Image: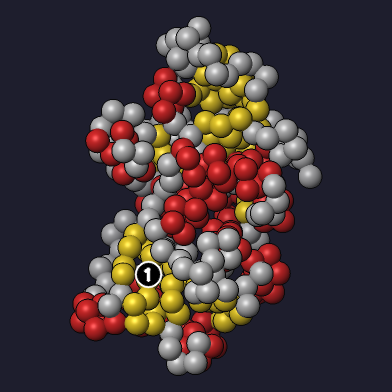
Amino acid sequence: MKAAIYSGLNQIAVQQVPDPVIADPYEVIIKVHTCSVCGSDLRIFHHGNPRVKPPQVIGHEVAGEVVAVGKDVKHLQPGDRVAVGADVPCGECHWCREGLGNNCQINYAIGYQFHGGYAELMPLNATTVRFGPVHKIPDDLSYEVAAIAEPLACVINGLEMSYIKLGDTVTVIGAGPAGIMMMKLARSFGASRVIGVQRSRGRIPEALRLSGADHIVCSQDGDPVEMVRELTNGEGSDVVITANSSVETHLQSLKMARQRGRINYFGGLPAGSPNVEMPTNLIHYKELLVTGSHGSVPRQHRIALDLLARGVIDGKALITHRFPLNEIETAFATAEGHSGLKVVVSPTGESEC
Ligand SMILES: [Zn+2]
Ligand SMILES: [Zn+2]
């Protein structure tokens, strides 16, 4: 089969490699139809990650068709259409047994320690098949939209950790694909008013349309903290979520929040980013609740697929670029260029829209 092999910093190339074979009674092999590009793929590509040992196939926003199953796999069979998320619970540690697999002690993930989706075929090992986010795709959902269930699951995790209450104003910093989904879904969590903050001006009209936000302010127009305050009668936002990888927004979000506000650091920062000097007295006097969130658990991946199938989130509208596997470097550069939203790679070479 053809697979995009990540062999070290800034190096990825499509190569012919042996097809995977079923080596364990609980394994499954899927034919990958879609693997969408995530900001964390780009971080691995440029900065590496201690959990990724090259050579490795990366990519973790995956949808495909089951083509082979081990003899003890009862719940999947060849022909099934499945979506696969990223974080794989080990199934045995304290956190996994509590249903908090994204906080697993071992922290396995597809496209990190485990074979990823930028390949024609992808083996799912026994741990992934038994405990991981592997779910059948609802009939009317395309592979490329189903792949978006992975980032949407992370968005659901971030929103659950933001403790939104009915009637809240929710501000999301960063109007990329995750930020747009966050703004849209914040309404379902009870937000009555949604504000976005975005640096690149060109993205704002489309982000407004897709997210249904009340306002999206451009941070190049002035101090985003002041802009959010102005939109909230000088009080600040009930909830602020960072959906980007910019260090300064971690501090801005504390200032943007109102008294008793809740802040969620959703977007990860590149390895080696400087620490933010944290004005802890601001947290003290404003009685702020600051949380983080990362990844998702299988439950959230299942819910995400359902929300996409029911049109609560319009996944198709988020997809702006499609590339065959051979053009993976162009796909990465396109995702990095922020000219569009979701960039998908199709190892089967077929486009579905
Ligand atoms: Zn992702
Ligand atoms: Zn675990």
- In the shown orientation, is residue 100 left or right of residue 324? left
- Place residue 277 in its image quadrant: bottom left
Can residue 44 be seen in this snapshot?
yes
Q: Position of residue 310 (x, y in %)?
A: 69, 47
User: Is disc 1 surrounded by few (<14), some (14 to 19) or many (20+) residues within 10 Å?
Assistant: many
For the C terminus, which image quadrant? top right
Residue 135 against residue 237 in the figure, above or below: above
Q: Which residue is mark 1?
A: 263
Q: Position of residue 296 (x, y in %)?
A: 43, 46
Please provide percent x and percent y for residue 17: 53, 21
Q: Vertical placement of 28 versus 299: above or below?
A: above
Residue at disc 1, CB closer than 8 Å to ligand 1: no
Judged from this view, the residue extending furthest toward the right is: 353
Where is 242 relative to 353, above or below? below
Q: Image check: 146 left or right of 87?
A: right
- Image quadrant where one finds the N terminus: top right
228 or 36, nearer to the observer: 228
Q: Is residue 180 above or below residue 79?
A: below
Closer-to-camera residue (348/82): 82
Give the left or right position of residue 237, taking residue 304 as reference.
left
Of all residues, the one furthest to the front in this rendering is 166
Q: Identify which residue is drawn at 58% across, 23% down.
A: 30
**Residue drawn at (51%, 82%), measured in percent from left and top?**
219
Badge 1 amino acid:
Ile
Picture residue at 39% right of the left edge, 24% below the top: 127
Q: Name the residue at the top extreme.
A: 71
**From where the camera sits, is residue 18 visible?**
no
| Residue at the image position 39 percent from the left and 52 percent from the top | 294
Res. 82 image quadrant: top right
Foreground residue among 281 and 52: 281
Measured from the top left, where is residue 35 in percent x and y? 59, 39
